[in-house]
Image (spheres, rainbow, N blue to C red):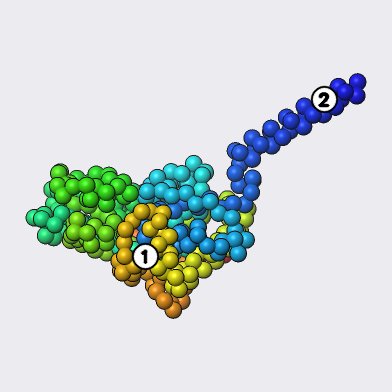
Amino acid sequence: MRKEIVIAIIAISIIAVSILAVFLYLNPTERDETIRVGWQPPWVNQGQIAAILQNTSILQQNGIEAKFTGFSFGPPMTEAALSGQLDVVFLGDQPAFNLISKDNSWKIVSPLVYYKSAILVPLDSEIKSLKDLKGKTIVTGIGSTTYRDTIQILKEEGIDRQEVTIKNLDVGGQLAFMQSTSDWGEIDAIAAYDPTVTLAVSKGLARPIKEYKSLGVIAVNKKFYEKYPGKIQKFIKSVKEAFEYYQKNSEQANQWYSDITQYSASNQLYAEMAALEPKMQKNTEIKLQLNQETKNELQKHLETAVELSLIKELEIDKITLQITDINN
């Protein structure tokens, strides 16, 4: 009888452990407090900050455990975020708007980096200006900030969205495409961002007909933040310290980023790419708060997205409410 009781207790214990294991598997934030971070290897200046966080003890010193998952550009990352695989994402402002429009449990909590975008054409192309793109085929990462800004730039030149053909080419494959051939075939232009832009131009693979500045942000899942508010605050503090590290150790950070991405770029080229981001310049104060100036910039970009029918007008207030400092 005692033997049967022992067996029963063991059986109940096994069942209990199995149920707990399934529960933890299905609820990863219940398992531990590890922050699941989405970042984009084919994107500077965000890339060096992510590389620093992965190669130094900054996160650990702030009591943070983080798992980094790389994505080729914003839209695939937002899909992962929507399916519950991520807690924090580094992405351009347009993918952030798209994410919030589909799931308002996400919020933009901090600016991240400015970076260079451009519309590129082959060196021997007859296209000399934006006006020459009318009737042409442009490839870009559809759904990205660059996609939105390309449509807006063409509109400002009097070219309607229907007067060009825009096709998708994964951001991670754009440089490889230009390196593989000098004949772009039916492709007339590529809308890209750094490091693709600077590397393509430096290697004589393309020339820009328009360059401009874009904004990247940090977005956080509110459910994770509400459960672990201190963790997110410490994570943002770690990002700030990563910028401080870059200011003092840019060559090391650039090398870590190159090791991850296999991009071949000199420190001079990295400095050129980082020039648009004040937080990456030596002895510059690092501010990651969503100040009014940044909020105004995001609001302007959001209104542009609505004007271009990339975001529905009825969603503008919902998204605006999710552009807020983590302390609010």
Residue at position x 72%, y 35% in the image: 17
Q: Which residue is mark 2?
A: 7
For the N terminus, the image quarter is top right
Which type of secondary structure does the marked residue at label 2 adopt? helix
Count of labels in the image: 2
Quote the CA–CA distance across marks 2 and 1. 63 Å
Q: Is residue 199 left or right of residue 74?
A: left
The crowd level at tag 1 (other Cα within 10 Å; few <14, some 14-19, many 20+) is: many
Q: Is residue 277 above or below residue 119?
A: below
- Can I make out residue 152 in this image? no
Q: Residue 320's spot in the image, x, y percent?
A: 44, 58
Q: Residue 53's spot in the image, x, y percent?
A: 50, 60
Residue at position x 22%, y 59% in the image: 203
Q: Is residue 124 above or below residue 85?
A: below
Residue at position x 36%, y 54% in the image: 262
Residue type (three-letter) at the residue carrying disc 2:
Ile
* Residue farthest right in this picture: 1
